[in-house]
Image (cartoon, grey):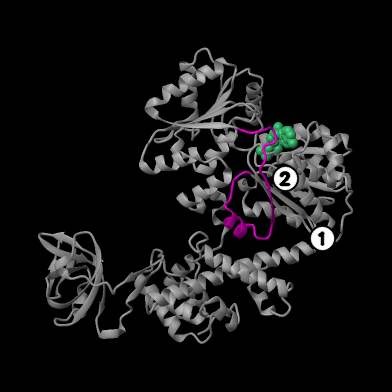
Amino acid sequence: MNLRTPINQIKGIGKQKQNCFKKMGIEKVEDLLFYFPRKYINLREIKKISNLKEGEKVTVKGSIIAREEKKGYGKVNYLKVAVSDGTGILYIIFFNQIYLKNVFQIGKTFIFYGKVEFFNKEMEMINPFYEEYEGKKIDWILPVYPLTKGLSQKIIRKTVKHVLKNLTEYPDEILPINRRFALNISNIKHALFNIHFPISEVNLEKARNYLVFREFFIFQLNLFWKKNVERKTEERIYRVDEKIIQEFENLLPFKLTENQKEVMEEIIKDLKNGKLIRRLIYGEVGSGKTIIAIFALWIFGKMGYQGVFLCPTEILAQQHYINWREFLLNQGINVSLLTGKTVEKSKIINEIENSKINVIVGTHAILNEKINFKNLKIVIIDEQHKFGVKQQEILKERSKNIHYILMSATPIPRTLALTIFGNMDFSTLGEIPKGERQVITYMFSKENKEKVYSFIKFLISQNKIGFVITPGIKENENIESVEEKYKELKEKFTDIKIGLLHGRMEKEKQEDVLKKLKNREINLLISTTVIETGIDIPDVSFIVIEQAEKFGLAQLHQLRGRVGRSGEIGYCFLIVYNENEEVNERLSSFIEKESGFDISELDFNLRGPGDLLGTRQHGILPLKIGDIYKDIELLELAKKEVERIFKIDPELKKMSYLKKFIKNE
Ligand code: ADP
Ligand code: MG
């Protein structure tokens, strides 16, 4: 039996079970080896029967003192076995498994693992795990696998055991023995044996450490390889004028911040070095990322290349287009807007293919159309976290050597960023261009929300504008709908001009409502989180977030980022409908924290990375065993080792065996 042996060639695996295994992604022996237990049952902690408590899951060791077949209601029959360990009697019940009576022979000793229940003053376990106790032969630490319908723990355990016994080759080792020794990690054989059937807790830990390290190592290896190889491939070194940033600034109505200039310098440096740009620019809402994008589009546009500015929403694309069209046109750079709504699509596509257009601002519509770009050189993805990983990569295939700039306002903890975006460079925009921003955040319970409403009434009387955010569009049991809220507040505030905004409205209407808000034709906008995404409304004074407990911290942070950008104090009101300790703690710390990075660490700690990244990026990390949060030390160890390797052997010539761990996508 080798790693490629199909699973159905294993004894006991027929067509039906083969299909079940396939559902779990297991087709060959190797897949099974890397199908890790989800947890373990330690059978060593044996409890005395006299000490058992109802409801607990325990291991008991005892001998069979009696057994009988019973008829229950209907067709149910069961086997009842009495077990004693000298301190008391425990009854074991097996439903519809009368044949087990041959197993539980009187006088034999077994261990049982299961949940203790009381029934008619008797202590019972129903359908527990059991194994005959014959001294050392027991697997004291029992693996528990993720299951699918049609498979049981028993089958998987048996199959894995069979494989481990009959396997004649093992997966290739990632590192030579001296390195593994230096890093204090074991070997693949030890690891695979002990992750499935650990001999001891210590061995289990060693096995897990090895496998986590291995996983991170391969992951980082791929990132570094991509970074090293892919990025070398830009065929030309650009000569960039020393004063180019100055020249650009002179065209703008405002001065660039030092921070913005730094990021521009970083971009230019890549070009001068003939490196493909792979840069993630993180900056809070309002930190002025757009101008960086325009700068890059301008540089390439002036050279006659094409660039794409990809936005997650129609509103955002339109906004960028409207704001920057003239600027670029004045520089001889032709711009087009391409979204799902674009009427003259084929004409525009034609012009792109004939190189009449340099800059295309648009939504995922750009990805959907099969455009043959004439000479696409740069892609900028605004609010990149709103796009799936695959979507972000689509344009890479359309042209050779494309530079990529990703922009994000979702703060990501550094360690996580290194893991996911390890093949990229980072820039941060920290400074807010229009001076210090001050937002005061308050939390109110639902009962006290009238206080909030009367305060915003006051603000509006001062000609201020603001938002009321609700979590949902449509009403459902738990979530107040935006339309309901709109009606409610319209009735309440008869003398205030109120607008409604949500993602299912026509885009023109959305745009229209925002324009009205800007012009003070309305003062209060009831909205869903559509406003979270990058829309530039400069001087909103307050934001009321209804059912704040329904939002993630990163999201709240984005929402809060909408206010107080005019230089005046902004107000953020969190209205909590369902208070509990967890919610209180979470929101209180949100109130205290100001910067996005703090928030991200907080969110990460409280909820884990999945929530932080949003569902879109949830599947981004192909990790089976490693946990980027808990195993951070191993992650760093793996990263260091990969760094070390690439330092001495950047093209993996000496260590060419490592290439087989590199996936070619
Ligand atoms: P982000 O995309 O990072 O959320 P934007 O690029 O939309 O932020 O910028 C927010 C606002 O700040 C815009 O109105 C923009 O014109 C303005 N802005 C950007 N840079 C500067 C600057 N250096 N000085 C003054 N205003 C700026
Ligand atoms: Mg933006």
Q: Which mark is residue 234?
A: 1
Q: Quadrant of residue 443?
A: top left
Dot 2 and dot 1 residues touching (CB under 8 Å): no
Is 356 displayed left or right of 386 in the figure?
right
Image coordinates of residue 124 in percent, x first then y, are 17, 65
Q: Could you tell me which secondary element the residue under label 1 belongs to? A: loop
Q: Which mark is residue 65?
A: none
Residue located beneath label 2 in the image: 366
Image coordinates of residue 476 in percent, x first then y, are 42, 35
Say what amino acid the circle numbered 2 marks: Ile
Q: Which residues are magenta?
A: 409-437
Residue 575 in sight from this viewpoint: yes
Is 30 displayed left or right of 283 in the figure?
left
The answer to which of marks 2 and 1 sits earlier in the sequence is 1
Residue 342 in sight from this viewpoint: no
Is 645 displayed left or right of 144 in the figure?
right
